[in-house]
Amino acid sequence: MNENSLCTKTHEYVLEQGSKYEVGITDYAIEQLGDIVFIELPEVGAEFAKNEVFATIESVKAASEIYMPISGKVVEINEELVNSPELLNDEGFEDKWLIKIESSADQVEFADLLDYSDYKEEIE
């Protein structure tokens, strides 16, 4: 996640990377969950509408649903996290994205997303 990420109020982020978008959960969400023990990601090729549940994550504290920040089709999943979900808690682990999607979302879908700096203000 970086300064160019757009965030939801439910702590997901989306980051444009050329023709694809990286989707994940924010560092704040990871901190709140605590020790992550399981993650269920969708299949490549699955399509989701904005705000639809696309993944489930479980920690020692709770299970949470993860919502799609914009509509899109899954083109890649982070296999490393499926096999070792605890990597999300590792400060040194850089690839914390969950899925990569192709999307033809219009500006309306992006309208309610927060710039990273606005998101940080909202959670403080």
Image (cartoon, rainbow, N blue to C red):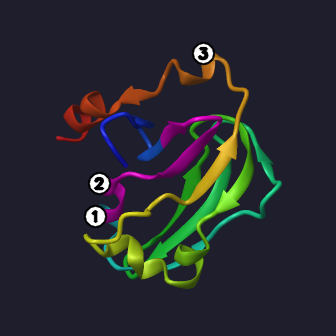
Mark 3 highlights which residue? 107
Q: Secondary structure at mark 2?
A: helix
In this picture, is 48 found above or below 96? above
Tell me what residue is drawn at x 30 percent, y 63 percent. Answer: 32
Q: Amino acid at mark 2?
A: Tyr
Tell us which disc is closer to us: 3 or 1.
Answer: 3
**Where does residue 68 sit, x and y in percent of width and height?**
61, 44
Horizontally, residue 40 falls left or right of residue 115, namely: right
| Label whose residue precedes the other's in the sequence (3 or 1) | 1
**Where does residue 63 sit, x and y in percent of width and height?**
50, 70
Mark 2 highlights which residue? 28
Report, in whole angstroms, how far the alpha carbon at label 3 lies from the one at label 1. Answer: 30 Å
Tell me what residue is drawn at x 44 percent, y 63 percent. Answer: 95
Report, in whole angstroms, how far the alpha carbon at label 3 lies from the one at label 2. Answer: 26 Å
Determine crowd level at label 1: few under 14, some 14-19, many 20+ residues with C-alpha closer than 10 A: few
Determine crowd level at label 3: few under 14, some 14-19, many 20+ residues with C-alpha closer than 10 A: few
Determine crowd level at label 2: few under 14, some 14-19, many 20+ residues with C-alpha closer than 10 A: few
Report, in whole angstroms, how far the alpha carbon at label 1 lies from the one at label 2. Answer: 5 Å
Mark 1 highlights which residue? 31
Check the image and name the residue furthest to the left: 124
Residue 115 is inside the magenta segment = no
Q: Secondary structure at mark 1?
A: helix
Dot 1 and dot 2 residues touching (CB under 8 Å): yes
In this picture, is 18 found above or below 37? above
| Label whose residue precedes the other's in the sequence (3 or 2) | 2
Residue 23 is inside the magenta segment = yes
* 21 or 118, nearer to the observer: 21
**Where does residue 3 sit, x and y in percent of width and height?**
30, 37
Horizontally, residue 41 falls left or right of residue 91, namely: right
**Where does residue 6 sit, x and y in percent of width and height?**
43, 33
- Magenta span of residues: 14-31
